[in-house]
Image: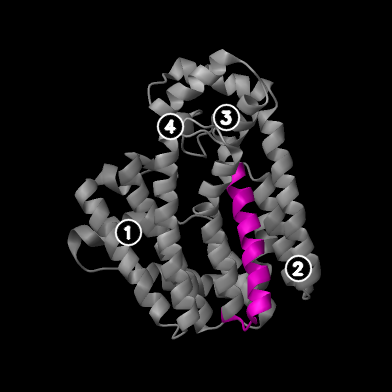
């Protein structure tokens, strides 16, 4: 099934308008900055978060200039955070393309990220909506706090599913949550409706991150990272957390400690990945995705009236669960 076509169907023209506005926001006349921004613009992506903003606005009213500038502000903030994350993580690739820090250097990447962040604030200011501006500003704080929590968790010897959820709620889920809530507000949702949309977005974001984490247990050129990359960066994600907390293999717990200490090698990562698969870690993570999927579909059934939007959001949920990259 072509989920993306169904998702785009009720917002096709609005999505084209978003892309044009977003691309114009990443235009600049100066040489190096222009080159770096063009490098980022070429990534494109599937526009999952902007589509969510547009669909929620349409659900509660109509897609307006406020919606579009909000969507651009959100996507620019997300883009800036990725540029900075690649510096922090010393990543050389992003979506199969060289990262800004790899193509230029860390100094350029930090400054380009700052420029994009400022452009994000400029676009959200165009909404003239104080509540939306506050939402985006708080999102920036939450994303930074989530990164710091993740870094501090690497030093924490406890292997906790609760901490895993705390981290992703302040990272991926926070972005989806803000896109849904801001989209709803821009469409005319009241406080109660906005809060329901916000929870829907959080559930979507949790599912999205779990799926991303599952990818790390398999090789794929489309994903743009090798198997076990999260472990190489000191991160233990949901599948391996489940496997470790439901078995007593001391050798595997020793390897997990080496992950957190940053001393694990590629062969040991391969052992831990295989252990996770054998102990049902992937199946457990998929079950958790299905749980959050049901919560999302309950929201759609109760809060979305227009058939095209209902079909689009249902396809969105199914796509997040079933996507291959």
Q: Is residue 208 magenta?
A: yes
Badge 2 marks a residue whose secondary structure is helix
Of labels 1 and 4, earlier in sequence is 1
Q: Nearer the viewer, mark 1 or mark 4?
A: 4
Q: CA distance from mark 1 to mark 3?
A: 31 Å
**In the displayed structure, would residue 137 be above or below residue 258?**
below
Q: Which residue is mark 4?
A: 234
Q: Which residue is mark 2?
A: 310
Q: Which residue is mark 3?
A: 218
Q: Which residue is mark 1?
A: 38
- The image shows residue 188 at horizontal and vertical percentages of 62, 84
Q: CA distance from mark 1 to mark 4?
A: 32 Å
- The image shows residue 45 at horizontal and vertical percentages of 49, 54
In the image: residue 66, left or right of residue 10: left
Badge 3 marks a residue whose secondary structure is loop
Chain part drawn in magenta? 186-210
Mark 4 Cα shell of 10 Å, populated few (<14), some (14-19), many (≥20): many
Q: Principal SS element in the magenta part?
A: helix
């Amino acid at each position: 099934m072509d989920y993306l076509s169904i998702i785009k169907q009720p917002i096709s023209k609005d999505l084209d308008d978003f892309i044009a506005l977003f691309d114009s926001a990443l235009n600049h006349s100066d040489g190096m900055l222009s080159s770096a921004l063009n490098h980022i613009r070429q990534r494109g992506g599937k526009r999952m978060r902007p589509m969510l903003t547009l669909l929620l606005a349409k659900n509660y009213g109509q897609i307006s200039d406020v919606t579009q500038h909000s969507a651009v502000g959100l996507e620019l903030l997300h883009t800036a955070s990725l540029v900075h994350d690649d510096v922090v993580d010393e990543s050389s690739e992003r979506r199969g393309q060289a990262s800004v820090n790899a193509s230029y250097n860390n100094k350029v990447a930090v400054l380009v990220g700052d420029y994009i962040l400022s452009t994000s604030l400029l676009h959200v200011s165009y909404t003239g909506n104080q509540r939306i501006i506050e939402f985006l500003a708080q999102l920036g704080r939450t994303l930074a706090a989530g990164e710091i929590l993740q870094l501090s968790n690497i030093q924490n010897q406890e292997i906790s599913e609760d901490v895993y959820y705390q981290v992703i709620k302040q990272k991926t889920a926070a972005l989806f949550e803000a896109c849904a809530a801001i989209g709803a507000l821009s469409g005319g949702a009241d406080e109660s409706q906005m809060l329901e949309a916000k929870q829907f977005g959080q559930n979507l974001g949790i599912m999205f991150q779990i799926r991303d984490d599952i990818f790390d247990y398999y090789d794929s050129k489309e994903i743009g990272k090798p198997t076990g990359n999260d472990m190489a960066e000191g991160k233990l994600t949901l599948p391996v957390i489940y496997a470790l907390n439901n078995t007593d293999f001391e050798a595997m717990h020793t390897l997990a400690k080496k992950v957190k200490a940053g001393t694990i090698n590629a062969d040991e990562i391969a052992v831990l990945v295989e252990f996770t698969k054998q102990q049902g870690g992937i199946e457990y993570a998929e079950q958790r995705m299905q749980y959050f999927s049901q919560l999302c579909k309950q929201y759609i059934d109760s809060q979305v009236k227009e058939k095209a939007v209902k079909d689009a959001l249902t396809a969105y949920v199914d796509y997040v669960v079933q996507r291959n990259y």
